[in-house]
Structure formats: C-alpha cells, structure tokens
Image (spheres, rainbow, N blue to C red):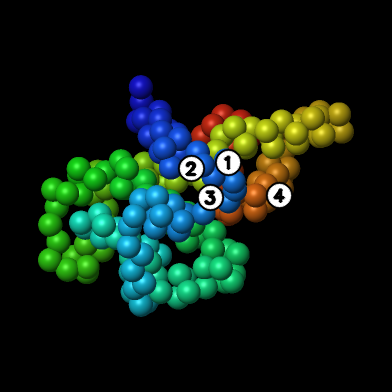
Amino acid sequence: MNGQDKVWEAAEAFRRQHLARAGGTLPVDVFSLVELQLRLDVIPFDDLQAKYRIDAALTQDFIGMYVDAESYVFWERGPVWKQNRLRFTVAHEIGHLVLHRDYAAKIKFGSFDHFARHFKGDDPARYWLEQEANEFAGRLLVPVERLRELFDQFARQIAGIMPAWLQSEDLRIKFAEQVAPKFGVHAQSILTRLDREGLWPAP
C-alpha cells in the first residue's frame, strides 16, 4: 500500500466513523464535525490569515483549533470563495489530527510564532505532511463515489455530442466549475480529485 492509499484509507475510515449519521450530506459541515464529533474547541484568532497566511491551525495539545476570527465570523454569510477556502483548511487540519498526531507531539513550541515558522518552512518532511493533509481533505470533502456519479452523468450527456470530450481541458474545467458548489470547494479541488482518482486526468 502506497502513501496515497494509506491517506485514502484513513479518510474513508474517518468518514465512516464521524459522517455516517449525516447520510452523505454535502457540503461537509466541518465546524459541526470539529465541535460536536471531535469535541475540539474552536478558538477565534485575530488576524490569523493576515499575520501567518493561514485560516486555521490545531493547538499543539490537540484539544482545540485556532480559526481566523474574521473568517469564522463570516462563515455563514461570507463570500462563497472564503467559505470554501476555510472549509478546505479545516478539513486539512483534521487530516493532520488523524495522520500526524504522533509526529507533532514530539515537537515543542515556545510560541505560536515558532509554531508558524516551523510549519511554513521548506523542510521536505514537512512538505509531505502538508501534501498528505491536503489529500485527506480532498478525499473527505469530495467523496469519490459522489464525484463518480456526477462524472458518469456528465459523460452520458456529452458523449453523443462531442466524441473526443475527454481530450478537452476547457470542458474539464467547466465540469469542475459546475460541480464544485455541490461539495463546497473551489473548482481547482475538483480538478485535483479528477486527476487523483483517475476519473478525468488532465489531457
């Protein structure tokens, strides 16, 4: 089993444990998940995005999650693009919680500044941790079965009109833009899932 398969397995196990009662409701309600299922304290952090260029971060003791105060306040009525960004970031942090707890527990930070510098560094090991958390978030927010259903519906509609549709990057982007709102993510996240899941790789 390769690294990606392990991340996928962890994401699907997490979904079965924590989202089964939601019945596949989309977009995933990440804050209900964080507060009610995982019992993490959500801690508004003034200017988290402005100061550190992040929207959310787990506390080192794993009992809470810092969230950019402005983004959190406007969660229900803010711009859709900002909601989507925060949803993905929170799912990313959940990925760290599930996948990297042991790694993070070995490191002690004297301040949040130290923490932020550490995880914004260019160490290759940290790069892969971030990639794994991104992959977890993508798999969690965009269930492959639902994406495949939408892809199959689209394929049936377009195949008779445009036989070479799979070679069209413009059409691929339009599909991603069309379905992204169903999952509450940016179109780029859908393009990534189409590629990772082997459903519609970039031509």
Q: Position of residue 136 (x, y in %)?
A: 42, 42
- Residue sitting farthest toward the right: 161
**Residue count near mark 4 (Cα–Cα under 10 Å), binned few <14, some 14–19, many ≥20:** few
Q: Is residue 16 left or right of residue 99?
A: right
Residue holding disc 4: 178
Q: Are marks 3 and 1 in contact (CB under 8 Å)?
A: no
Per the model, the C-alpha gap separating discs 1 and 2 is 7 Å
Per the model, the C-alpha gap separating discs 4 and 3 is 18 Å
Q: Position of residue 189 (x, y in %)?
A: 55, 48
Q: Amino acid at mark 1?
A: Gly
Per the model, the C-alpha gap separating discs 3 and 1 is 8 Å
Residue holding disc 2: 19
Q: Are marks 1 and 2 in contact (CB under 8 Å)?
A: yes
Label 1 sits on a secondary structure element that is loop
Per the model, the C-alpha gap separating discs 2 and 4 is 24 Å
Residue holding disc 3: 28
**Residue count near mark 1 (Cα–Cα under 10 Å), binned few <14, some 14–19, many ≥20:** few
Label 4 sits on a secondary structure element that is helix
Q: Position of residue 147 (x, y in %)?
A: 62, 37
Q: Amino acid at mark 4?
A: Gln
Per the model, the C-alpha gap separating discs 1 and 4 is 19 Å
Question: Counting residues from the N terminus, which is met first, the one under dot 2 or under dot 4?
Answer: 2
At 18% from the left edge and 65% from the top edge, which residue is drawn? 114
